[in-house]
């Protein structure tokens, strides 16, 4: 037991990696799904365990110097690869593990209908590799390692998007589009890392942080920052570099969309925040460089235009995809305020939005599973035929709007607080305007679900099996619960925010 | 938790549990409606049981849970809230009886959904009434918007759905765009959102900030229907009449003006507003709404639309009372919450009864209708006189106090506004009664003079509310004593 406790950081990545390698050998039955589910749940348990360790340390010695360092293969830091867990990435790890555990549990029926029988085991192999990459990016303390694992998860994601059966041609072209832009983004990121390496001679984050302290006037460092900024903006679909997202999230298999929208782009945000706040330093970025206005303007545009585009969509999944672009806007806006409320709001929104958006994609997946399509036209009258699924969708939608007692409200509360704290009432208005736009795109769907009468052809449509409805409702239900009692996500997000801002 | 706190909790959960039971009993209409009625009676009983505690100066408090660190969902009863809760729960009983008659006579569909959401709305009203801080108030305020939506769009027609959009659009744009911003701003300035006697904002912000905050609050509470954010109210008239009666004469609109009153008294504090004169613009904004809405009411031929604009006008009386920021104004405004509720619900009940009995909705078609529906039209007359503000009906007292308040605040021109408004009330209400009894082409088929009233379930409640208008005239002093506690503490 002691052995496990001490090696948790490595196990969190190694376990799904081994499972991914094992999955193709398990034959055509349900076995590969069982393996994937057990693995993701084990990972969830381990991330919770890890968070409890971090939480204990934070209580004992103050938040700002809390971390667990793990030297991979016992190669001494900073020569070897270091895994470094602190209050910030321990929080993100839980989000990744939580969503992937629930989505994997949901996957069985959805995948068996969408993926040819002989390819299912390969699907789960890629799926586990995808999750391995996301966990690895988040836990590692080495910037080159981030690049490698980001590419592991991205390559797996490109293949997973291409497996979308409905609109299979569109899924293919979406995947190519995603691949090209994702690779360009990764290249920019790699160049940025390379420049930093050329100046400092190190790839270890903690080491970089120390060595960059005296180099704020260095042109190479500033160039590196710009390259990293662009590369990561592509990865996290930050406006205006979001072009690949709507199709990739819109045409991928629903469970892939759920993980892409709920978690993957958030991992891009994680790396961005890591570079801005820890490696380059919050003072350097937000006080010495004029980055805050750039971030805030583009974040506002992302919120408004993303929501506006969501209103124009007829496909449920594309609508949710555009909504994700807007949500990334909220998250960027929050951290760019660079104060405690704003950063807390940003991080708590990463958590809340992961729950809501994954739940919504799963609900859309149920519609696809039962009806075959999830366009507005196919949703007519489903409120009576699939009451549980549609109630889940409506509740998730209310969360996107930010109605009180949903978790979206909690996020917006802190974001608005952060904006007022900076004296930028206009940003508070943008945030609330975003809520109103969200109301329009959510209500368009609600009206169709509950007021339009069902087409005759759909008379045999029934509520989906519990194996699909239950995990959807667990995610949506959690988002409602954390809207009523936000103490747990608040504690995690606030602790991470204080850690990043170097507060006690 | 003390005994009083439990009462508050029971008051909140009664309608919610009732709603659950109603939804569950959907297959047995008689049982369902019996439960609906019992819930209403029980709730009113609980609310009136709390009354003596509040009269003796207690404020029973009940906390649910902490939503954000430092921000709890808390219910705390004070006189103003209890007044609103009593009106809403008391009139819910009558509306329940009335609904049974109306919905059955009209053979409406989806009645289970109707009764369920009706009960939920009352739950939200109790939450608003007893809210211990602005945060709690906001949550129940938004909940009320959501749970009344299925009632407004009850018929599911394109027209209803469009009206539903206007309804949600206006209420959410104002509440999310202005009210929420004002609340977070207040929290940022003061670090508390509790309703406290004397307000919490004194000395916390510059006058300019306070002025902006006040505007955000007043326009943010769209349910108060202060122009230009009033359009949702006439749109919502597409709902079945019992909904219009309870929700758009009592629960929803009064939730709006009640919130305005509560924020002015307990967040800003009338002393602060009185000394800084920040509310002068609001007096004139309210006066404009009073007159403009009355003028629009004159032009409406559809009876429910006319009553809707009349409501908009009357709501601004209450806002005016709050804006006067002195004892007379606050008491007069609060009293008008009760007086107008009884008068207007009588009028809506009558409009619904006419619709049930004759299927007529337009004023121009109601000639000689008093001959066949004498009881309904006499009740209509009583309701009208109370809304106009003539003795011996309740409405005269609240207007009296408002006028006194205007004079003592030194704004004599507002007295003229109130007088002109009374004349306009006469002009848009009395012709209906006159037409019904004396003039106008008969709407009845020739030779038909038989009495043909609406079903008893509809008729009895409207007689009770009409009698209420008369009774309230004699209990105005008790109300006055009860309400002065708000300002004195």
Image (cartoon, rainbow, N blue to C red):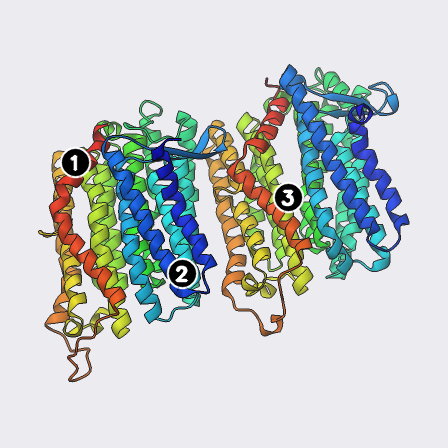
Identify the mark at residue B77; answer none if there is no mark: none
Image quadrant of residue B96? bottom left
Work out how far the residue at label 3 is from the one at label 1, CA to CA, in angstroms. Answer: 63 Å
Count residues near mark 1 (Cα–Cα under 10 Å), then give few for <14, some for 14-19, many for 20+: few
Q: Chain of mark 3?
A: A
Mark nearer the viewer, 3 or 1:
1
Q: Are marks 2 and 1 in contact (CB under 8 Å)?
A: no
Q: Is residue B380 left or right of residue A333?
A: left
Outermost residue, bottom direction? B447
**Residue occupying image coordinates x 17% and y 84%:** B446
Identify the mark at residue A240; answer none if there is no mark: 3
Q: Chain of mark 2?
A: B
- Is residue A340 visible in the rendered image? The answer is yes
Answer above or below: position of B357 versus A357: below
- Percent position (x, y) of residue B449? 15, 79
Identify the mark at residue B481; answer none if there is no mark: 1
- Percent position (x, y) of residue B383? 17, 57
- Is residue B172 visible in the rendered image? The answer is no
Task: Point out the tag, 2 or 1, that comes first from the N-terminus.
Answer: 2
Work out how far the residue at label 3 is from the one at label 2, CA to CA, in angstroms. Answer: 55 Å
- Percent position (x, y) of residue A321? 64, 50
In the structure shown, which secondary structural element does the residue marked by tag 3 occupy? loop
Q: Which residue is mark 2?
A: B32
Quadrant of the frame with the N terminus of chain B: top left
């Amino acid at each position: 037991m002691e052995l496990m406790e001490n090696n948790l950081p490595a196990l969190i990545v190694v376990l799904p990696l081994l499972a991914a390698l094992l999955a193709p050998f398990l034959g055509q039955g349900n076995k590969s799904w069982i393996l994937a589910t057990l693995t993701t749940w084990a990972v969830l348990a381990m991330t919770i365990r890890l968070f409890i360790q971090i939480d204990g340390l934070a209580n004992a010695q103050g938040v700002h110097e809390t971390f667990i360092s793990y030297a991979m293969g016992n190669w001494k830091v900073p020569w070897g690869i270091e895994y470094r867990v602190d209050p910030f990435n321990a929080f993100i790890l839980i989000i990744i593990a939580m969503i992937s555990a629930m989505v994997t549990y949901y996957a069985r029926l959805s995948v068996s209908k969408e993926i040819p029988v002989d390819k299912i085991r390969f699907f789960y192999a890629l799926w586990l590799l995808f999750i391995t990459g996301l966990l690895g990016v988040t836990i590692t303390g080495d910037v080159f390692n981030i690049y490698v694992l980001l590419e592991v998860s991205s390559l797996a994601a490109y293949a997973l998007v291409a497996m979308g059966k409905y609109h299979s041609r569109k899924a293919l072209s979406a995947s190519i589009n995603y691949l090209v832009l994702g690779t360009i983004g990764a290249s920019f990121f790699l160049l940025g890392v390379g420049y930093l390496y050329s100046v400092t001679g190190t790839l270890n984050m903690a080491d970089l942080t120390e060595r960059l302290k005296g180099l704020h006037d260095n042109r190479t460092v500033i160039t590196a920052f710009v390259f990293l900024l662009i590369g990561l903006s592509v990865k996290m679909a930050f406006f205006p570099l979001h072009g690949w997202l709507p199709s990739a999230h819109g045409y991928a298999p629903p469970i892939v969309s759920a993980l892409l929208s709920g978690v993957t782009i958030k991992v891009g945000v994680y790396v961005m925040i890591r570079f801005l706040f820890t490696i380059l330093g919050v003072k350097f970025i937000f006080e010495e460089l004029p980055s805050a206005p750039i971030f805030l303007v583009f974040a506002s545009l992302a919120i408004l235009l993303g929501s506006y585009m969501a209103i124009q969509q007829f496909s449920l999944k594309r609508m949710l995809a555009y909504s994700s672009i807007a949500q990334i806007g909220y998250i960027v806006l929050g951290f760019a305020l660079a104060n405690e409320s704003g950063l807390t709001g940003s991080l708590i929104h990463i958590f809340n939005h992961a729950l809501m958006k994954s739940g919504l994609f799963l609900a859309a997946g149920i519609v696809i599973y039962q009806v075959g399509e999830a366009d507005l036209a196919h949703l007519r009258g489903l409120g009576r035929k699939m009451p549980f699924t549609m109630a889940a969708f409506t509740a998730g939608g209310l969360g996107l709007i930010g109605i009180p007692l949903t978790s979206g409200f909690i996020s917006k509360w802190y974001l608005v607080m952060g904006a007022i704290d900076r004296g930028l009432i206009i940003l508070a208005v943008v945030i609330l305007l975003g809520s109103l736009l969200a109301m329009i795109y959510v209500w368009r769907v609600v009206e169709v679900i509950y007021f339009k009468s069902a087409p005759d052809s759909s008379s045999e449509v029934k509520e989906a099996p519990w194996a699909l409805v239950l995990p959807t409702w667990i995610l949506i239900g959690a988002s409602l619960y954390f809207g009523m009692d936000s103490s747990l996500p608040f504690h995690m997000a606030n602790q991470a925010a204080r850690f990043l801002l170097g507060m006690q | 938790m003390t005994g009083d706190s439990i009462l508050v909790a029971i008051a909140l959960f009664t309608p919610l549990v009732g709603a659950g039971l109603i939804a569950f009993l959907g297959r047995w209409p008689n049982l369902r409606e019996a439960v609906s009625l019992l819930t209403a009676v029980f709730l009113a009983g609980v609310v009136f049981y709390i009354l003596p505690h509040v009269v003796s100066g207690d404020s029973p408090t009940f906390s649910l849970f902490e939503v954000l660190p430092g921000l709890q969902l808390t219910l705390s009863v004070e006189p103003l809230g209890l007044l609103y809760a009593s009106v809403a729960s008391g009139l819910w009983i009558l509306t329940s009886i009335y609904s049974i008659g109306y919905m059955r006579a009209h053979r409406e569909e989806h009645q289970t959904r109707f009764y369920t959401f009706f009960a939920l709305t009352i739950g939200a009203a109790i939450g608003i009434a007893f809210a211990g801080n602005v945060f709690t108030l906001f949550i129940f305020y938004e909940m009320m918007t959501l749970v009344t939506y299925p009632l407004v769009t009850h018929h599911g027609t394109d027209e209803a759905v469009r009206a539903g959009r206007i309804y949600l659009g206006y209420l959410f744009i104002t509440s999310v765009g202005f009210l929420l911003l004002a609340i977070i701003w207040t929290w940022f300035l003061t670090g508390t959102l509790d309703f406290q006697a004397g307000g919490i904002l004194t000395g916390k912000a510059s006058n300019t900030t306070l002025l902006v905050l006040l505007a955000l609050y007043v326009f943010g509470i769209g349910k108060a229907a202060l122009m230009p954010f009033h359009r949702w109210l006439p749109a919502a008239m597409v709902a079945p009449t019992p909904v219009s009666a309870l929700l758009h004469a009592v629960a929803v609109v009064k939730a709006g003006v009640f919130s305005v009153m509560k924020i002015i008294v307990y967040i800003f504090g009338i002393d602060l507003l009185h000394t800084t004169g920040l509310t002068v613009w609001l007096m004139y904004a309210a006066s404009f709404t009073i007159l403009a809405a009355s003028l629009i009411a004159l032009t409406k031929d559809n009876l429910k639309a006319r009553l809707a604009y009349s409501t908009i006008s009357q709501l601004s009386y209450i806002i005016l009372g709050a804006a006067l920021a002195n004892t007379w104004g606050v008491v007069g405004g609060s009293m008008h919450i009760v007086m107008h509720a009884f008068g207007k619900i009588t009028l809506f009940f009558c409009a619904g009864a006419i619709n049930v009995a004759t299927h007529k909705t337009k004023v121009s078609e109601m000639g000689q209708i008093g001959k066949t529906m004498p009881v309904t039209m006499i009740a209509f007359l009583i309701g009208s006189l109370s809304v106009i503000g003539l003795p011996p009906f309740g409405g005269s007292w609240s207007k009296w106090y408002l006028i006194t308040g205007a004079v003592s605040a030194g704004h004599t021109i507002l007295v003229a506004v109130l007088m002109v408004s009374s004349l306009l009330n006469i002009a848009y209400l009395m012709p209906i009664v006159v037409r019904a009894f004396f003039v106008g082409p008969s709407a009845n088929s020739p030779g038909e003079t038989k009495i043909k009233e609406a079903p008893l379930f509809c008729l009895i409640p409207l007689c009770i509310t009409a009698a209420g208008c008369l009774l309230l005239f004699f209990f105005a002093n008790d109300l006055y004593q009860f309400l002065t506690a708000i300002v004195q503490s």
